[in-house]
Image (tube, rainbow, N blue to C red):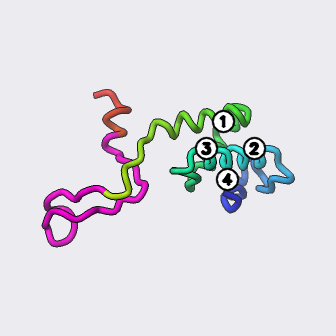
Amino acid sequence: IDRDLGRTFPRHPLFAGGDPQQSPAIQSLKNVLVAYSAHHAQIGYTQGMNYIVAMLLGFMPEEHAFWALIAIMGKREARPATTPRRSGEGSGGGGGGAKDIGAEYNFEDIMKKGLPL
């Protein structure tokens, strides 16, 4: 988190400087990110969250930004760490085995839930 604070919109007046000691907005950004990573240990902090929170902080106070981040991230369901491979996936063309997908999100399911057809 600390590494990304100074990288978050460094030219924007709200976040210029990148030092939590000098910028109340940077301190709020850090507070929200640390609180979210403690609140949702399964996800923790991932790169890119700093930009989402920074945008929120441009429009609302720190506590509201925290709850808004929870609402935004709550709409994404992480897949399990491994899933069975379908026949023909991966090398060798055979079925079986496990496909390591880490904490990637199932984009297709999210799109089905989020976009009306």
Earlier along the polypeptide chain: callout 1 or callout 2?
2
Q: Quadrant of the C terminus?
A: top left
As for residue 115 lying within the magenta part, the answer is: no
Query: Badge 1: how crowded within 10 Å, few (<14), some, or many (20+)?
Result: many
- Tag nearer the camera, 3 or 2: 3
Label number found at residue 65: 1
Q: In which quarter of the image is the N terminus?
A: bottom right
The magenta stretch is 83-109
Earlier along the polypeptide chain: callout 2 or callout 4?
4
Query: Badge 2: how crowded within 10 Å, few (<14), some, or many (20+)?
Result: many
The residue that mark 4 highlights is: 8
Q: Are marks 3 and 2 in contact (CB under 8 Å)?
A: no
Label number found at residue 28: 2
> Disc 1 on helix, strand or loop?
helix
Going by the numbered disc 1, the residue's amino acid type is Ala
> Disc 3 on helix, strand or loop?
helix
The residue that mark 3 highlights is: 39
Q: Are marks 1 and 2 in contact (CB under 8 Å)?
A: yes
Question: Looking at the image, which residue sits at the far bottom?
Answer: 92
